[in-house]
Amino acid sequence: MAKQTVLILDFGGQYNQLIARRVRECGVYCEVHPYRMTVAEIKEKAPIGIIFTGGPNSVYIENAPKPDKELFELGIPILGICYGLQAMSHVLGGNVKPADKREYGKTAVRYDRSSPLFKGLGDEGMVWMSHTDFVSEMPAGFRSVAFSSECPVAAMEDSERKLYGLQFHPEVNHTDNGTLILKNFLYDVCGASGDWTMHNYAQQIISDVREKVGNGKVLLALSGGVDSSVCAQLMKKAVGKQLTCIFVDTGLMRKNEGNEIEEAFGGGDINFIRVNAEERFLTKLAGVTDPEKKRKIIGEEFIRVFEEEAKKIGKVDYLVQGTIYPDIIESGAGDAAVIKSHHNVGGLPDFIDFKEIIEPLRLLFKDEVRALGRELGLPERIVRRQPFPGPGLAVRVIGEITKEKLDILREADAIFREELEAAGLDSSISQYFAVLTNMRSVGVMGDVRTYDYTIALRAVTTTDFMTADWAKIPYDVLERVSNRIVNEVKEVNRLVYDITTKPPATIEWE
Ligand code: XMP
């Protein structure tokens, strides 16, 4: 199925993936590529429009990243954002120079509403600015269509050549009607029809996979996380019984998680193998307290269990991996373009006899993976699952791991999650869980002295998990969680809330 494509050429800005997210939210498929993508490669993609991202450079310094001049002669509409606008100006003969005063933060601008970009907006609006350089002289053929008190060219256009530029960032939430501005560019300038829908995509990828796999045998390591679950569901719809999923239940999962996975996939539509390996893992982990050692043991044991099962199956044709788009986007600027490659289960392909890897989610962002899961009928509990570390609860039980400690943590964690969900906070908090500290303290229950564990609650908000803030959970919710946990979970008599940011702390405790 042909779909309209917009190309986002990456000049190294911090919001580049966000631009892509917004474009897709507008129902238009897009891809992010380094700004160095050649004109020939661009033509091959036949995009309906191109967006230049922001970037950290000044366009007038030597070796600053610049678009190829030929791009502007293809007749393809182009929108330059921030540095992208300056680069467009510079290459087409305008002038860009440093301003006396850096413009940063929410800024009021006035729009010329005769520009198609600002259709449906008021005369004035707040936008997010983050720049020192500005366009002091526009290239021939352009006119300014927005300005602020500091910036005479907050937006410019050459409607004849369909070239547009914004000094501000329409992709961030701080810009009022930012998505509408992008939508105007996509629909009114590029002629988008909005053909990127999850329904269409699901149909397309199912038929692509079917065609590729033919009668072949497919193997998938199902962790129960969102990505591998969506992969499994998709492959189930595409090839049914040709698919074998191996789910290694390490005994380190949250309450009911293993059963939920079995319920979703064990119905006989595919070959579903649940390996109950709790005892193996706990035996290996007995007496181990060092976090790195725990991780290593679990990683190795996982591979071993998986290998044993895979060998029983013998040769397969395809191995499915849940790689998603942010893992493969190549960064635009910088000299060494690094391609991040992420494998949920490191080293897996080495010992399995297979022909090719299939990555059915490689074009999707995380929230699109969830949307696809919903489209394919996965239960909401699985679709909304938060990131969960590979080593599971082993890194949330501090110190030595025992089944008893895991059970205590599972109960406390389930209550915490239940209460946050009941309070409607689960969608605004990125990740939340309980940790069983290795500390016991004195308490009193009834008239009896207790000497029990302390549970720590962790809840963070973050967009990239590289930095995170602790979530400001209302006191009454914390109070309910605390009451329930100390009342309902034996062996816990104290509860603390972790209020450290990352950095200096990490999200997980180990
Ligand atoms: P930290 O603790 O480093 O965690 O701030 C950042 C994010 O990564 C998750 N995490 C892991 N995910 N395997 C994973 O797949 C792991 O070993 C692992 N350790 C941490 C963590 O839950 C958080 O979302």
Image: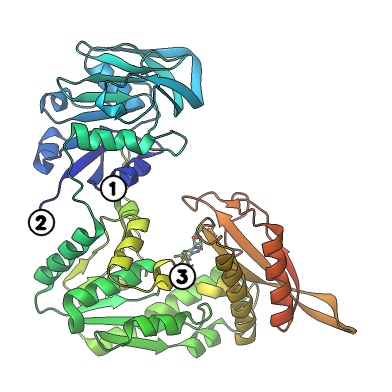
Tell me if label 2 and label 1 are in contact, CB under 8 Å. Answer: no
- Identity, as a three-letter code, of the amino acid under mark 3: Gly
N-terminal label among 2 and 3: 2
Local crowd size for mark 1, using a 10 Å CA cut-off: few (<14), some (14–19), many (≥20): many
Q: Which mark is residue 271?
A: none
- Identity, as a three-letter code, of the amino acid under mark 1: Arg
Q: Secondary structure at mark 3?
A: loop
Label 3 beta carbon less than 8 Å to ligand 1:
yes
- Identity, as a three-letter code, of the amino acid under mark 2: Met
Q: Secondary structure at mark 1?
A: helix
| Quarter occupied by residue 142 | top left
Instruction: Kindly identify which residue carries mark 1.
Output: 24
Q: Secondary structure at mark 2?
A: loop
Q: CA distance from mark 3 to mark 1?
A: 30 Å
Residue at screen point 47% across, 65% down: 386
- The percent coordinates of residue 38 (x first, y second) are 16, 35
Q: Is residue 118 above or below residue 226?
A: above
Instruction: Kindly identify which residue carries mark 3.
Output: 390
Residue at screen point 38% across, 35% down: 178
N-terminal label among 3 and 1: 1
Q: Which mark is residue 1?
A: 2
